[in-house]
Amino acid sequence: MTAEAGQVYIEDLGRHAGATVTVKGWLMNRRSSGKLHFLQVRDGTGVVQAVCFKGNLDAETFRRLDLLPLESSLEVTGLCKAEPRASGGFELDASGVRIHQEAEPYPIGKKEHGTGFLMEHRHLWLRSSRQHAVLRVRARVIKAIRDFLDERGFVCMDSPIFTPSACEGTTTLFPVDYFGETAYLTQSGQLYAEASAMAFGKVYCFGPTFRAEKSKTRRHLTEFWMVEPEVAFLEMDGLLDLIEEFIAYVVAQVLKDRRAELEVLERDISRLERVVRPFPRISYDQAVALLHEKGQAFAWGGDFGAPDETLISEHFDRPVLVHRYPAQVKAFYMKRDPADDRLALCVDVLAPEGYGEIVGGSERASDLAFLLEQIKAHQLPEETFRWYLDLRRYGSVPHAGFGLGVERTTAWICGVPHLRECIPYPRMLEKITP
Ligand code: 4AD
Ligand code: MG
């Protein structure tokens, strides 16, 4: 990591033991006794304690430190010393402190705040150690996603965000005025990813997706990030293998590089360590039977609600792949199961511990006449799908893909119950600020 001259990031202090360094950051906490201030300073990469002896600082600075409000910005110069009892293993013996700005009284204190209050102060809440840990895990999840796909020859082909068509049903579309015509914010980049796969073989799109979810739940955002791999000539069994390998990889990378963050979150790491291949695979029919065994009333043919998904996932110690749902509860583009025409060749992955669906995927219908029929049956405007149907006219092939939601995956890995903590600036029903 690069830094300004003389500046050292807290995460790099280990390489500077015995040297005089400067740390630039914000005051996170302070303890004082007459001749001594202990400052907890954070710089975004970590937290370090600076020990300030009265005799080592000028009198005016020492006096100001006594009253310095939390989140004031400052830089501390001092000797970097190994200190086994300190959180990062080091502390600073301060020889100089420069105060950049004395903060106004900070609204987020040590006392418990309500979620509404914290959400209104999301721009500041991000500084707290728990939010910091969740969002560092999220960033690592995103890097793992890209590394996995890039290393396997997938080409990143981003799909547009303004679209004229609905991919995942017409009830959750956000319309926007596009020079006098109605366009929508994309619900999924999949249809374009299919076109990209016919040009590049293996592709993925990765970006924000939008759904006008009108219900308030822990699992729904109106803006969320989704990665959508799409592969030509991939069929159902290969799709299940790819999804399994992908999820196991992402979890392993987080375990390798973000253990400290998981500890801050008091995540039961042993539960994540169990997330290795193979994952259980059950059909929709078997999932329904499981629900009945557990005494849950559920009629064959419907989609699983959150309580159903929780009951199913609790039965397993790792993500479970539920495949072959009734086509009537799924999107128009899915291929039917040749063994049972009522079923779609699709899969949902349910995360353990009741975190719900993290992946939805399917083999795609490759037959032109069947797709046309489905577009009509779903009452979708044929005109806007003309280009999509071309893919079935010019060299149609079996193909498959899936979408993984970044925030749901992050919530599960972190053990955080609500998605609002798993994206920097959440967008939800009636929530658009900050
Ligand atoms: O199951 P979904 O709707 O699938 C699709 O959009 C397909 N077109 C993907 C594909 O095959 N390329 O959404 C995929 C995933 C879900 O499993 C979930 O993780 C996430 O996207 N997701 C949401 N995350 C947060 N808030 C919401 N409102 C979400 N809706 C879906
Ligand atoms: Mg789904």
Image (cartoon, rainbow, N blue to C red):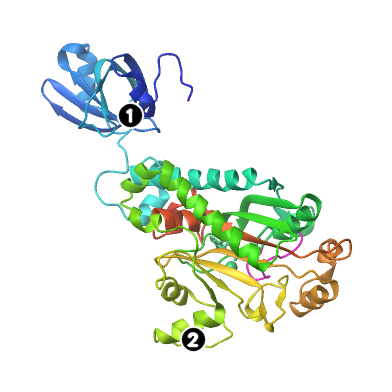
Residue found at the very far front of the displayed protein: 278
Question: What is the chief secondary structure element of the magenta stretch?
Answer: loop
Residue 72 is labelled as 1
Bounds of the magenta span? 164-173
The residue at the point 68 percent across, 72 percent down is: 331
Per the image, the residue denoted by label 2 is 298
| Residue type at numbered disc 1 | Ser
Answer above or below: position of 114 versus 367.
above
- Give the side of residue 399 with respect to residue 306, left or right: right
The secondary structure type at the circle numbered 1 is: loop
Residue 322 is labelled as none
- State yes or no: residue 169 in magenta: yes
State the image coordinates of residue 338 (x, y, percent, origin top left): 72, 79
| Residue type at numbered disc 2 | Phe
Question: Real-space Cα distance between discs 1 and 2?
Answer: 56 Å
Q: Quadrant of ligand 2?
A: bottom right
Between discs 1 and 2, the one toward the N terminus: 1
Residue found at the very far right of the displayed protein: 394
Observer-nearest of 127 and 372: 372
**Residue mark closest to the camera, 1 vs 2:** 2
